[in-house]
Image (cartoon, rainbow, N blue to C red):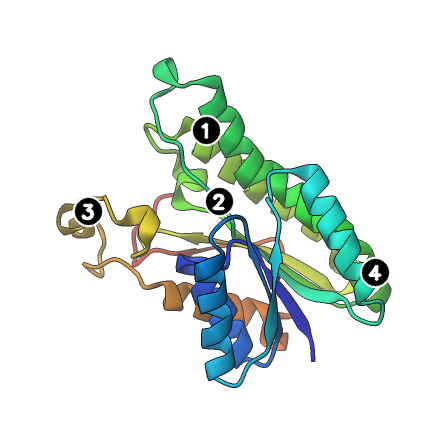
Amino acid sequence: MDIALVTGASRGIGKAIAIQLAKDGFYIIINYKNNEVEAINTLNEISNIGGKGELLKFNVSDKADVSSTIATWKKDNKDKYVKVLVNNAGITKDNIMVFMENSQWEDTINTNLNSFFYVTQPLLQDMIINKSGRIINIVSLSGLKGQSGQVNYSAAKAGVIGATKALAQELGKKKITVNAVAPGFISTDMTANLPEKELKKMVPLNRFGKPEEVGHLVSFLASEKASYITGETIQINGGLYIR
């Protein structure tokens, strides 16, 4: 059974991705930082549909924690490797730059950008040896167009988009694809406080997206059907297209 690791899989988009990949037949490693109750709920939902998985707690923004946890998992699973990696975990700490605290910048960059390197790098060798892998990075519309009040978040997500393109060049000959998915307004905890009634007027489809819809896109990119797609950033935003 092929293995998929989804970071930040206890809630929202990450949870929906984990459940969809389980439906596709993947064994799911559910990463979480603090919310063990919700992580267990994700695992239970996977079990209820006949899927299999496990929990793996680590803080994606802490290099030492990521390194030691992944090293321990690899030691305990010598005959296995993570074939599909979904870098989904992220945070927002919004503020206009003139008032932005150093911690708001650093925490956002560490969690959304540095984590891409911390989590991906130790898993690459096994993908290269096996000449098979999928790396899917969840980015944002903010990383494509920029967003007022989100200089930190926009910078981090734009950085991941650039890294996605570069890593795709490095890994293509090893039959490993690297792509990014850029959601627009998706109904999750992160958007719960937004004025949905007003914002959906900006969206041609006149609604917020569902986490499951992002899950379907990731499912496609993780499949053999997407074997000739790499280095791309695919927007899923109901037509809210801004390059």
Question: Badge 1: few (under 14), some or many (20 or more) residues near its Cα, within 10 Å?
Answer: many
Does residue 121 appear in the picture of this structure?
no
User: Of the residues shown, which amino acid type is indicated by label 3?
Assistant: Leu
Question: Which mark sits nearer the N-terminus, 2 or 4?
Answer: 4
Question: Within the image, what quadrant is residue 56 found in?
Answer: bottom right
Left or right: where 63 falls relative to 199? right
Q: Which residue is mark 3?
A: 199
Q: Amino acid at mark 4?
A: Lys
Distance in Å between CA atoms under marks 4 and 1: 36 Å
N-term mark: 2 or 3: 2
**Residue 210 located left or right of residue 15:** left
- Give the amino acid at mark 1: Asn
Asked whether disc 1 touches disc 3, contact meaning CB atoms under 8 Å apart, the reply is no
N-terminal label among 4 and 1: 4
Q: Tell me residue 86's x, y (percent).
A: 58, 58
Q: Secondary structure at mark 4?
A: helix
Q: Secondary structure at mark 2?
A: loop
The image shows residue 27, relative to residue 165, as above or below, that is: below
Is disc 4 in contact with disc 1, using a CB cutoff of under 8 Å?
no
Q: How many neighbours does mark 4 have within 10 angstroms: few (below 14), some (14-19), or many (20 or more)? A: few
Which type of secondary structure does the marked residue at label 3 adopt? helix
Tell me, for residue 75, which label it has, or none: 4
> Percent from the top left, x then y, of residue 224?
63, 76
Residue in the foreground of this view, choosing between 56 and 119: 56
State the SS at label 1: helix
Could you give the CA–CA distance between mark 2 and mark 3, rounded to whole angstroms?
22 Å
Labels 2 and 3 touching (C-beta < 8 A) = no
Residue on which disc 1 sits: 152
Residue under numbered circle 2: 90
Give the mark, 1 or 3, whose residue is nearer the N terminus: 1
- Rendering coords of residue 187 (x, y %): 29, 57
Residue in view at x 40 percent, y 19 percent: 100
